[in-house]
Image (cartoon, grey):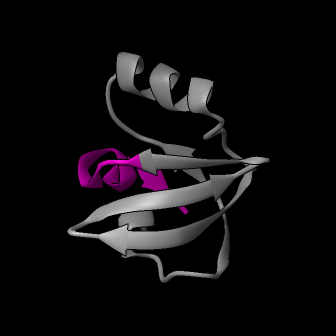
């Protein structure tokens, strides 16, 4: 399922990143790599704050839809 459909507070494993090569590379640079654990810290109007590795990253609803967990 896409990351934006996941519930807050649970740990998820990234399965794959979809979208254009440019988008995938951007997300990989932020730490969103298949096999990495992520959790949603909070959601607001579809946008999410995600805990990935040792960082918290805010991403848009559109970007969250490209991350499959």
Q: Is residue 2 visible?
A: no
Q: Quadrant of the N terminus?
A: bottom left
Whether residue 8 is situated above or below residue 49 in the rendered picture: below
Query: What span is in magenta?
Result: 59-69
In the displayed structure, does residue 66 sit left or right of residue 34?
left
Residue 32 on image: x %, y % = 61, 40
Outermost residue toward the top? 22
Outermost residue toward the left? 45
Residue 26 on image: x %, y % = 47, 23
Whether residue 47 is situated above or below residue 5 in the rendered picture: above
Whether residue 24 is situated above or below residue 67 in the rendered picture: above
Q: Quadrant of the C terminus?
A: bottom right
Q: Give whichever of 62, 59 is nearer the camera.
A: 59
Q: Residue at x 46, y 76 (%)?
A: 6
Q: Residue at x 40, y 40 (%)?
A: 18
Res 46 → quadrant: bottom left
Residue 19 on image: x %, y % = 33, 34
Q: Residue at x 20, y 69 (%)?
A: 45
């Amino acid at each position: 399922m896409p990351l934006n459909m996941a519930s807050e507070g649970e740990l998820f494993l990234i399965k794959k990143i979809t979208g254009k090569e440019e988008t995938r590379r951007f997300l990989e640079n932020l730490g969103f790599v298949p096999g990495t654990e992520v959790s949603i810290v909070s959601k607001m109007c579809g946008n999410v704050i995600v805990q990935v590795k040792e960082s918290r990253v805010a991403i848009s609803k559109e970007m969250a839809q490209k991350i499959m967990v």
